[in-house]
Image: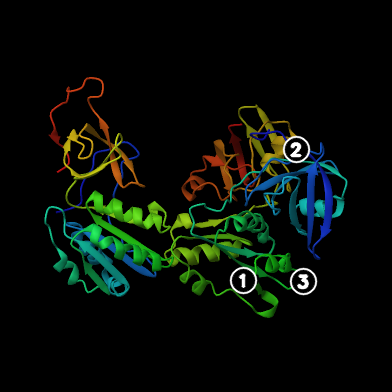
């Protein structure tokens, strides 16, 4: 699976690039599912610089929510550390420990679904890196992590618009409005004025 | 004239000779009131009437932002400069009335930083003094690395070492001491922001070293006020006001416009803030861009100029002013 092409949207909607090797004292990679391919491709592009980069690289990988597991391809790269966790939640304490111990000069590369990119970017920001200092490349599912603006509950892996809030049961319209602090898109009640007038759910985020 | 508030009438309340090259000036309000609040890293433009020549130089505020009774600046005498620092040194005495602008901050400490790493060279120490006064009481983490030519010319070394023991590192050129920049930058915790103020060469060295070591651009901050460079006199046409002015050898375009009564915007007067950016209507010749504001592409395009520091050489320069 290759890089995702996104339609132009509001400024708040995150945009993703293509991972590029950068100079740095250490290199931290976080990826899920198909995001492994972005790391493999970047290392291939690094050419002769790849060996030095991998000597100082730490890869944290979790299989995708859809079951995609490309850990073997990452292991073959021969990074100094390559770790597989069953989920991002399970990997998060490792990620936060790595960030807490890191020095300036650390390069952060995030690849895979928006959810994992967003959660890892939030951890990097909380550790003090500016949000635009981390590189991102989207691969795989477009399923969204959405916060209900009414009850503040977060529903994971939302694929349809509208959808029903898993916390309060309201019918929510999924906006492109995104919060880096919450690592979530915004869901707003779609039938507030006319309760029950809910357009049919469309699978917008495969 | 300048954007924003009118000037503040002040009285020079104190002039202190810090060392052979540096004098410190304290300004209080002529009406006895409080000064406007400022944040660490701010500067003010000081107006001077140098025997008929109007000079307006930016200086960093070095006093404690919590001190609302006065502002303090330190001025390093530049014997080869255009005369602003010489005027301050020779003619400004305690009790004198002067006018200053309101504080503007183009060099604030980033509140998101986990740690602030300050690198000062010589008189570049001043903005860090107000920053540290602001940061210390709130428990913010910071560290100062201060390079001075000689112990005698190291302004405020004793004061800073006493106030922030363990957080101030001084390097004396004369003793062959130099900052080990690579080790310093390699050992900073994630979330550190780097600030550098000093001579041009030092700023470039620190910034390029940090970038090469992988520091993100938004974590590296610098401030350098440029004095308008001296050059050959030239003519400039002002399309909107329908005037043609001659810019003198030791004058900037901005100063020539002000002398002719043309209302032109400005803020820092040192090529840093972008406020005076002016569109170039026609340019038959070469613009000597001296500012830090325009991008390299913009400079090459010859469609914009910063009249506070940039000069022209050639046949015709027409500005939209």
**Disc 1 from disc 2: Cα separation:** 38 Å
Classify 10 Å Cα crowding around label 1: few (below 14), some (14-19), many (20 and above): few
Q: Determine which residue is flagged by label 3.
A: B152
Q: Determine which residue is flagged by label 1.
A: B166
Q: Position of residue B243 (x, y in %)?
A: 68, 29
Q: Secondary structure at mark 1?
A: loop
Q: State if disc 2 and disc 3 touch (CB < 8 Å).
A: no
Counting residues from the start of the chain, the first of labels 1 and 2 encountered is 2
Q: Secondary structure at mark 3?
A: loop
Q: Looking at the figure, which quarter contains the C terminus of chain A? A: top left
What residue is drawn where x is 65% and y is 52%?
B226
When asked about the image quadrant of residue B37, the answer is top right
Q: Position of residue B53 (x, y in %)?
A: 80, 42
Q: Is residue B191 left or right of residue B258?
A: left
Q: Position of residue A96 (x, y in %)?
A: 34, 62
Which residue is situated farthest in the top direction here? A194
The dot on residue A28 is none
What residue is drawn where x is 38% and y is 52%?
A132
The answer for which chain carries disc 3 is: B
Q: Looking at the figure, which quarter contains the N terminus of chain A? A: bottom left
**Mark 1 against mark 2, which lies toward the viewer?**
1
Q: Determine which residue is flagged by label 2.
A: B8
Counting residues from the start of the chain, the first of labels 3 and 2 encountered is 2
The foreground one among B24 and B230 is B24
Q: Is residue B83 visible?
A: no
**Mark 3 against mark 1, which lies toward the viewer?**
1
């Amino acid at each position: 699976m290759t890089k995702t092409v996104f339609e132009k949207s509001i400024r708040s909607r995150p945009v993703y690039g293509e991972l590029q090797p950068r100079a740095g004292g250490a290199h931290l990679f976080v990826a899920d599912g198909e995001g492994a391919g972005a790391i493999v491709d970047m290392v291939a592009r690094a050419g002769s610089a790849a060996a030095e980069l991998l000597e100082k690289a730490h890869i944290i990988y979790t299989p995708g929510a859809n079951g995609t597991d490309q850990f073997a391809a990452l292991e073959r790269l021969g990074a100094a550390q390559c770790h597989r966790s069953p989920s991002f939640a399970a990997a998060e304490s490792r990620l936060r420990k790595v960030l807490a111990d890191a020095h300036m000069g650390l390069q952060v590369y995030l690849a895979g679904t928006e959810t994992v990119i967003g959660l890892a970017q939030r951890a990097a920001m909380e550790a003090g890196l500016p949000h635009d200092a981390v590189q991102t490349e989207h691969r795989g599912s477009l399923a969204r992590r959405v916060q209900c603006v009414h009850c503040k509950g977060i529903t994971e892996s939302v694929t349809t618009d509208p959808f029903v809030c898993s916390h309060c049961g309201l019918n929510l319209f999924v906006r492109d409005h995104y919060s880096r602090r919450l690592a979530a898109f915004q869901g707003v009640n779609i039938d507030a004025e006319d309760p029950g007038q809910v357009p049919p759910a469309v699978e917008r985020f495969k | 004239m300048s954007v924003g508030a009118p000037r503040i009438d002040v009285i020079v309340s104190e002039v202190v000779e810090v060392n052979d090259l540096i004098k410190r000036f304290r300004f209080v309000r002529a009406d006895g009131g409080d000064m406007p609040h400022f944040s660490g890293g701010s500067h003010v433009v000081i107006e001077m009437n140098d025997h008929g020549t109007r000079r307006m130089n930016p200086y960093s505020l070095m006093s404690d932002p919590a001190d609302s009774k006065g502002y303090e600046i330190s001025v390093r005498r530049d014997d080869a400069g255009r005369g602003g620092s010489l005027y301050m040194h020779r003619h400004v005495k305690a009790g004198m009335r002067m006018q200053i602008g309101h504080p503007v901050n183009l060099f604030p400490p980033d509140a998101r930083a986990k740690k602030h790493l300050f690198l000062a060279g010589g008189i570049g120490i001043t903005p860090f003094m107000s920053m540290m006064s602001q940061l210390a009481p709130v428990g913010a983490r910071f560290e100062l690395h201060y390079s001075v030519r000689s112990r005698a010319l190291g302004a405020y070394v004793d004061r800073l070492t006493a106030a922030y023991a363990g957080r101030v590192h001084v390097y004396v050129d004369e003793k062959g001491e130099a900052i080990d920049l690579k080790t310093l930058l390699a050992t900073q915790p994630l979330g550190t922001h780097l600030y550098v103020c000093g001579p041009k060469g030092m700023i470039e060295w620190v910034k390029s070293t940090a970038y090469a070591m992988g520091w993100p651009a938004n974590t590296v901050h610098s401030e350098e006020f440029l004095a308008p460079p001296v050059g050959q006199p030239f003519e400039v046409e002002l399309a909107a006001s329908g005037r043609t002015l001659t810019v003198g050898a030791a004058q900037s375009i901005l100063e020539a416009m002000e002398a002719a009564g043309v209302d032109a915007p400005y803020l820092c007067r040192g090529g840093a803030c972008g406020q005076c950016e002016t569109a170039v209507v026609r340019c038959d010749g070469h613009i000597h861009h001296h500012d830090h504001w325009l991008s390299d592409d913009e400079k090459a395009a010859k469609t914009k100029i910063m009249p506070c520091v940039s000069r022209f050489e050639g046949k015709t320069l027409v500005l939209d002013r």
